[in-house]
Image (cartoon, grey):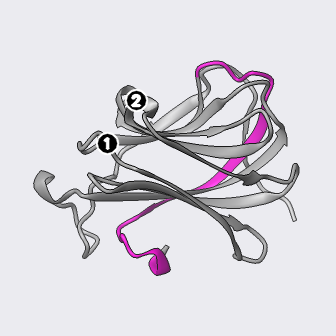
Amino acid sequence: YSRASFKLNANTQNFYYSGVGFGTDGTWAAAANRNYYWDSFAFRLETAPSSDTVIGQYSNKGALIRSQLSVTSTGALKVANESAAATDTSTVLTVGQWYILSYLYNVNVADTVVIRNADTSAALDTITVAENGGGSPQSFGVGVFGNVNGMVAYVDNFVMEASNTLADI
């Protein structure tokens, strides 16, 4: 099948969207209750970068980065908490395969990425690091943050979730 996707192959080619901060009932939550943020998107790697390349981040619109998701030079995914004090790396992705990446930022708990096969929905890997920043981000960004490092990839189907239950994602 085919998709109308965003091609990532240039430096600093990204966008942010707000919407993080939903309560458990799906309505906008008061600031004190914005404890978790799920964002999902489809991802396909065509060429691995020469060094780590950030493809997603929770931040205050680029400032005060709370968590980052990168593609490594081997083609694996890496999640890092604030200041990259801790990281976790996935198995290597298959070039040309579509994946669904479900990315959770859980304030004061953990940053988690669930990697699924986009065709079968089968969970392939989960990477998690303890959260160390303790603040609520204002936005989620997708794309290339910094140098593309030769990576060619595609992103599609962006979804903001209002649940912190893995089974709901």
User: Residue 151 in the image: x percent, y percent?
Assistant: 78, 30
Q: Residue at x 36, y 45 (%)?
A: 18
Label 1 and label 2: CA atoms lie apart by 9 Å
Q: Residue at x 30, y 42 (%)?
A: 137
Q: Mark 1 falls on what kind of element?
A: loop
Disc 1: which residue: 132
Q: Does residue 167 show up magenta in the picture?
A: yes
Which amino acid, by three-letter code, is at mark 1?
Asn
Magenta span covers which residues? 146-168
User: Residue 94 in the image: x percent, y percent?
Assistant: 85, 54
Residue 128 in sight here: yes
User: Residue 155 in the image: x percent, y percent?
Assistant: 68, 47
Q: Residue at x 39, y 76 (%)?
A: 165
Which amino acid, by three-letter code, is at mark 2?
Ser
Is mark 1 in CB contact (under 8 Å) with mark 2? Answer: yes
Q: Where is residue 148, by image quadrant?
A: top right
Q: Mark 2 falls on what kind of element?
A: helix
96 sits to left or right of 24: right
